[in-house]
Image: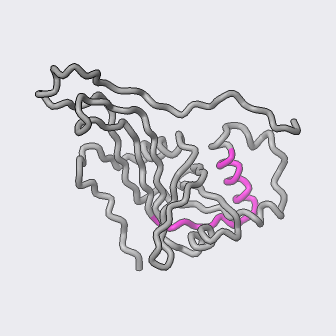
Amino acid sequence: MTAKADTRLRRLPERGSTDFKLACDIIDEAKICHVGFTLEDQPYVIPMALGRDGNSLLLHGSAVSRLMKNLADGLPCCVTVTHLDGMVLARSAFHSSMNYRSLMVFGKAAEVAEVAEKERALNTLVDHLVPGRSAELRASTIKELNATTLLALPIETFSIKTRSGPPNDAASDLNAPVWAGVIPMQLVAGTPEDAPNH
């Protein structure tokens, strides 16, 4: 039996949250997550695309993938999502930081196997990555669906930690001749580039 994940924040607990809506917002704004798991005493962390379907975080991959096979068989995992919102520059390196929103979701994923539900959820994942894209694509073939494993991880056991705001300089540093403040950071889509055979 797997022990329940300890989601308590021991350092700076005031930055923590158990707000389900905030957890969903962090997922909804993300295009990538990192999936952590352990096999034969070796830890792994794999970057993957993600989506959300109601109360579940969606992951997909090749049906022959060791990761997908083991997660579908009930291997516990931890999925992390992080947004870097700003570089927080104090007048000292010690007090410099980052503004961020981070989420860890713990649990066991379940395979979505029923064909119609799998196709619907895969479209949800596609539209999460590029809104409206699934309506433009041809329908997936049965062969393609069979070659893909789709997993749903319940967003039930999770931990959120965030930081926002300006630097917290030491009072003795306030007169130092060094710029202090926040450099905002964001992920922005560029201009689409046509495929060579477009």
Q: Residue at x 53, y 51 (%)?
A: 33
Position in image of residue 118 (x %, y %): 70, 59
Q: Determine whether, in the image, residue 175 is placed left or right of residue 73.
A: left
Q: Please give the range of residues in magenta.
A: 107-126
Q: Residue at x 84, y 58 (%)?
A: 141
Q: Determine whether, in the image, residue 154 is placed left or right of residue 181.
A: right
Tell me if residue 110 is in the magenta stretch: yes
Above or below: residue 3 compared with residue 49 = below
Q: Quadrant of residue 164?
A: top left
Position in image of residue 26 (x %, y %): 47, 43
Q: Residue at x 71, y 49 (%)?
A: 123
Q: Nearer the viewer, residue 11 or 6?
A: 11
Residue furthest left in the image: 172
Q: Main secondary structure of the magenta part?
A: helix
Tell me if residue 101 is in the magenta stretch: no
Q: Residue at x 44, y 47 (%)?
A: 23
Residue furthest front in the image: 177
Above or below: residue 124 compared with residue 168 = below
Q: Quadrant of residue 172?
A: top left
Which quarter of the rendering shows the C terminus? top right
Position in image of residue 169 (x %, y %): 20, 30
Q: Quadrant of residue 115?
A: bottom right
Position in image of residue 148 (x %, y %): 72, 63
Q: Determine whether, in the image, residue 31 is placed left or right of residue 15.
A: right
Which quarter of the rendering shows the N terminus? bottom left
